[in-house]
Amino acid sequence: MNDEKKLIIHPQKYRGETTIVSMRMPKDMLSDIDRVVAATGRSRNDILLTSLEFALAHMEVEEKGN
């Protein structure tokens, strides 16, 4: 068995200039996000960006009238 640990870095999908976005969300949702932040040691920004990137990649948009 190979016990060698590896750090695997995946390329970022989005690059370039950033902008600040403000949004409203339920307080209990923010609490859930902050629990993930605490458990992973990642920043809130990183968790939100990762989650949004995943959602965009797996989203299916229904056409109106369907």
Image: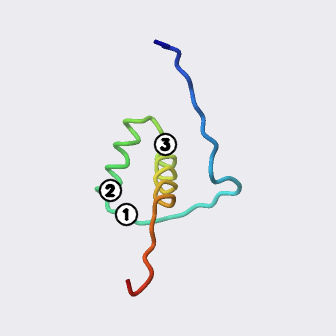
Classify residue 43 as left or right of residue 25.
right
Q: Which residue is mark 1?
A: 25
Label 1: which secondary element: loop
Q: Is 29 drawn above or below residue 5 in the view shown?
A: below
Compared to residue 7, the image places residue 43 above or below, namely below
Q: Using the numbered discs, state the Cα–Cα distance from disc 1 to disc 2 in whole angstroms.
A: 7 Å
Q: Earlier in the sequence, mark 2 or mark 3?
A: 2
Q: Decide: marks 1, 2 in contact (CB < 8 A)?
A: yes
Distance between the Cα atoms at labels 1 and 3? 17 Å
Residue 64 coordinates in the image, percent (x, y): 42, 85
Horizontal and vertical percent position of residue 59:
45, 64
Residue at image point 39% right, 87% down: 65
At label 1, the amino acid type is Met
Q: Which mark is residue 43?
A: 3
Q: Secondary structure at mark 3?
A: loop
Q: Element at badge 2?
A: helix
Which of the numbered marks, if any, corresponds to residue 60? none
- Mark 1 residue crowding within 10 angstroms, few (<14) / some (14–19) / many (20+): few
The amino acid type, in three-letter code, at marker 2 is Met
Q: Amino acid at mark 3?
A: Ser
- Decide: few, some or many residues near mark 3? Use Cα within 10 Å; few <14, some 14-19, many ≥20: few
Residue 11 drawn at (x, y percent): 64, 43
| Percent coordinates x, y for residue 13 in the rendering | 62, 51
- Sequence-wise, which precedes: disc 1 or disc 3? 1
**Quadrant assignment for the C terminus:** bottom left
- Picture residue at 64% right of the left edge, 54% below the top: 14
Disc 2 and disc 3: Cα gap in Å?
A: 16 Å
Q: Which residue is mark 2?
A: 29
Residue that extends furthest to the right in the rendered view of this protein:
16
Q: Name the image colouring.
A: rainbow
